[in-house]
Amino acid sequence: MNIKETDLYQPIHNYFTDLGYEVKSEVKSFDVTAVKDDSLVIIELKKNLNMKLLIQGTKAQRITDMVYIAIPRPKKTFSREWKDKLYLIRRLELGLIFISFEGNKDLVQVICHPKAFDRNRSMKRSSKKKTGIIAEIEGRYGDYNVGGSNRKKIMTAYKENCIHIACCLKKYGNLSTRELRKIGTGDKTTSILYNNYYNWFFKVSRGVYGLSEEGYKATEEHKELTQYYLKVIDN
């Protein structure tokens, strides 16, 4: 159905009235206001979640910390994109309300209430990701990617590790995983060879691997990295 912004008002009005609030519309440029005792709630309405709505919501936080943004319920609310949007709304300490229109019934669903965002707690929860990022940076020799690239192959620490192994096999021929680790290819050597994600290697015998034709091509394609790792091997 073609929903207008004004269609959102009555369901919001009814919801907060049932909670004991006195509800008024269009007060001092705010779409909806609700008052109970000394508590002031501001609700901004929009047909879609957009930057203008987020700005309106954060501006309303100058007046009260109880600010909601209300929109018609989107069709896809379990996507990664919507999870990211919800994170941003919580990060901005706004409340979010979905309104559904089904027949003659209007359903108001509070997705999250306005709440102070605990940044330290959030960072603690992401401590493993931070460790992973630092490990990825330390695992790369050079900077072969362009920031902002989309749908392009990127050079990762994992791929560099594969090139390191490929260089060892190119220089010495077939080697065991133990011999490769002694040369310095790292703890992930066995899993890299076993999974063979890029098809650069082939199994010669138990625990012994060689370099495939694809592997040789890879060392030619990534000449700068190949030269670097050959020097590392020599040293």
Image (tube, grey):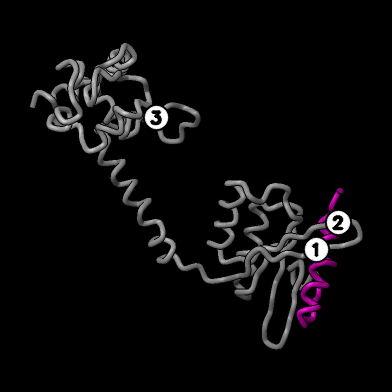
Mark toward the viewer: 3 or 1: 1
Q: Is residue 133 above or below residue 114?
A: above
- 89 relative to 218 in the view: left or right: right
Q: Is residue 12 magenta?
A: yes
Q: CA distance from mark 1 to mark 2?
A: 8 Å
Residue 11, x across and y down, in percent: 82, 66
Q: Which residue is mark 2?
A: 102
Residue 165 versus residue 81: which sits nearer the camera?
165
Residue 137, x across and y down, in percent: 29, 41
Q: CA distance from mark 3 to mark 1?
A: 46 Å
Q: Amino acid at mark 2?
A: Glu
Q: Amino acid at mark 3?
A: Ile
Q: Is residue 85 magenta?
A: no
Q: Quick one: SS at disc 2?
A: strand
Q: Quick one: SS at disc 1?
A: strand
Query: Bounds of the magenta span?
Result: 1-24
- 235 relative to 107 in the view: left or right: left
- 97 relative to 153 in the view: left or right: right
Q: CA distance from mark 2 to mark 3?
A: 47 Å
Q: Quick one: SS at disc 3?
A: loop
| Disc number for residue 154 | 3
Residue 202 versus residue 156: which sits nearer the camera?
202
